[in-house]
Image: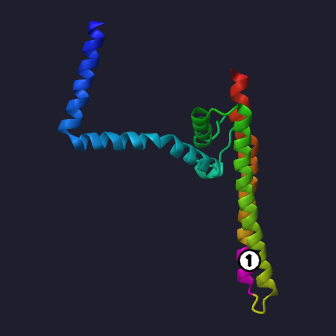
Amino acid sequence: TTTTTTTTSLKKEKKKLLSEESPPLQLQLRMTYRQCLTLPQRILRMSQQQLLLPSSSSDDTDDTDDDDTPPPPPQAQALASIQMLKGPSPTELLDLYFDSKATLLQSLLNKLQQEDDIAVTAVTGTTTTTTNSTNSSDKAESILCQMVVILQKDIILHPYFMFCSSSSSS
């Protein structure tokens, strides 16, 4: 009991000295503590934003796909961050992953619809130029290519590596 009272009295003395002698340090400690409180929400927000990106934008290597290559680390890290901070069930993680990819595909479909509207306007207008039509076709083709890559990588290949192959190897 003597050591407990001594430890308690030392803590009280340190706290008293800290608050009396250095108000700027005390203020800095409070600010750091408050900053740390917001970190989990920021990490969750960044992880969810990462899931809304196509995996091809997070690849740093060229498109040589081997069957043994793991999924891009940012996608898997985002899911791991969400798992650690929120603790959802595996089913909820799957739903979150595929919902984010469905949102990504929906945004690309909206872009494709806008390009289609622009192409129709260019054709029906009185001053139709072939460059506008060709440019619109190129953009539409690019959007379709992005969608195919997302379907191949984000919907088929990477979920297999993230959710299936790791559980079958253990």
Q: Secondary structure at mark 1?
A: helix
The vertical placement of 123 against 13, above or below, is below
Q: Is residue 130 magenta?
A: yes
Q: Can residue 67 be seen in this snapshot?
A: no
The vertical placement of 75 against 126, above or below, is above
Image check: 39 left or right of 116? left
The residue closer to the viewer here, 89 or 55, is 89
**Quarter placement of the N terminus:** top left
Q: Which residues are magenta?
A: 129-136
Q: Picture coordinates of residue 170 (x, y %)?
A: 68, 20
Tally of numbered tags = 1
Outermost residue, top side: 1
Helix, strand or loop: magenta stretch: helix
The residue closer to the viewer here, 25 or 71, is 25
Q: Picture coordinates of residue 53 (x, y %)?
A: 63, 52
- Going by the numbered disc 1, the residue's amino acid type is Thr
Q: Residue at x 47, y 44 (%)?
A: 38
Q: How is the image coloured?
A: rainbow
Q: Which residue corresponds to mark 1?
A: 134
Asked where in the image residue 64 lies, by quadrant, the reply is top right
The residue closer to the viewer here, 122 or 98, is 98
Asked where in the image residue 30 lies, by quadrant, the reply is top left
Q: Picture coordinates of residue 143 (x, y %)?
A: 72, 63
Q: Can residue 27 be seen in this snapshot?
A: yes
Q: Is residue 26 magenta?
A: no
Q: Residue at x 63, y 32 (%)?
A: 87
Q: Picture coordinates of residue 140 (x, y %)?
A: 74, 68
The vertical placement of 125 against 113, above or below, is below
Image check: 23 left or right of 33? left
Asked where in the image residue 107 lies, by quadrant, the reply is bottom right
- What is the crowding at mark 1: few (fewer than 14 residues within 10 Å), some, or many (at least 20)? few
